[in-house]
Image (cartoon, rainbow, N blue to C red):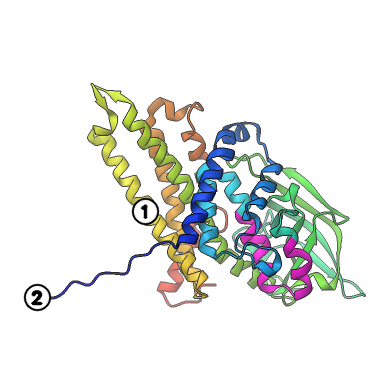
Amino acid sequence: MTTTPTTAPQFSLTDDQRDVQAMVREFAAARITPNAAEWDRNHTFDRALYAELAELGLMGICVPTELGGAGMDFLSYVLAVEELSRADAGVGVTIAVHTSASTLPIVHWGTEAQQQAWVPKLASGEWIGSFALTESGAGSDAGSMLTRADEQADGGFRITGRKQWITNGAYAGSFITFARSEPGTTDASGVSAFLVAGDSAGLSVGRVEEKLGLNSSNTVDMVYDDVSVGADLLLGTRGKGFRIAMQTLDGGRITIAAQALGIAQAAFDLASSYAKERTTFGKPIGSHQGIAFKLAEMSVEIEAARALTYRAAALKMAGQPHTVEGAQAKLFASGVARRVTGEAIQVLGGYGYSKEFPAERYYRDAKITEIYEGTSEIQKLVIARRLLGLDVR
């Protein structure tokens, strides 16, 4: 008995998506790549760069046009993060947090007044956005946060507490801030989300974090000292802020997968180029089986990570469930980034360990993708719960 083989539909980018990819790649090669080593070395956050990215529409790439954005789809945004991260992962995460964690939640859960007042400033690059969820004792267990939002007689709130690992914090014009608004609660059910302006009285930068990598991005503690927030700046439903945080992370994990993908691709490009140029025993090292096999395995892992990442983005774009698929993409892509960057150093040998080449920077930048937006262990838990038929929350 013979059967006719079926051909699986092939995923391909649209012309618009390819145009975005090419545009960002060209800009990154000209403006970011030549400066990335210096930014890393000097821990430089180049604020002017984000004004230039705004001119290209990248600060509001997937924000609706009626709110001042470019109106592109979510996959176009993922492609942009991948290409930016390929040049400098610190720039990639700055855009990812600004967009996924700080702008899109207002688009999705904000009132019309909140959207009109906040989103255009973020989409235009006038403001850089930030997301204040994590605390020193509330990382993966974010429901245990201690930051309080005490209700006032006028219906507003006073926020008091300290947030940790806040990306963009020192430069942010707005913060989506999570605080416990329901007295007596000790779990996620008492948490609400608030919109807090960066120039609010009582809001200040605490410690500036010294990090292993991503040195061109800004990471700080934020101190909330009796910060007044009007009732009109409650985002979504009171006491349901944790749901907003978790659904925001669902999409954010896809962009961190894209960041990891960009880092891995940059490391592979460097390693393969070096393998063609460096000779030993009279021939390029890439022709030796030990190096050739490394490059082959690296390319396969990168393409598999790309497929998972683009699939998760396509599901989100289609309005379909993507919690598990986003977790799968982040889990795999972050592991690929760590492995590929390590192998790139091995291919370059002593040069890989030297700051003369960017391999060591890629290696340092890659590790965080296994930690933030939910550790790899948390991603495994999300995936396993689906396999067992349990609530993925």
How far, Cα to Cα, is label 2 from label 1?
32 Å
**Residue at image coords 57%, 58%:** 373
Q: Which residues are magenta?
A: 96-120
- Residue 205's disc is none
Disc 1 element: helix
Given the current orientation, which residue lies at the most extreme right position? Answer: 153
* Position of 267 relative to 129 (above/below): above
Callout 2 amino acid:
Thr
Residue beneath disc 1: 303
- Residue 2's disc is 2
* Position of 8 relative to 91 (above/below): below
Q: Quadrant of residue 187?
A: bottom right
Q: Quadrant of residue 32?
A: top right
Viewer-nearest residue: 146 or 280: 280
Report if residue 327 lies within the magenta region: no
| In the image: residue 180, left or right of residue 23 | right
Q: Quadrant of residue 124?
A: bottom right
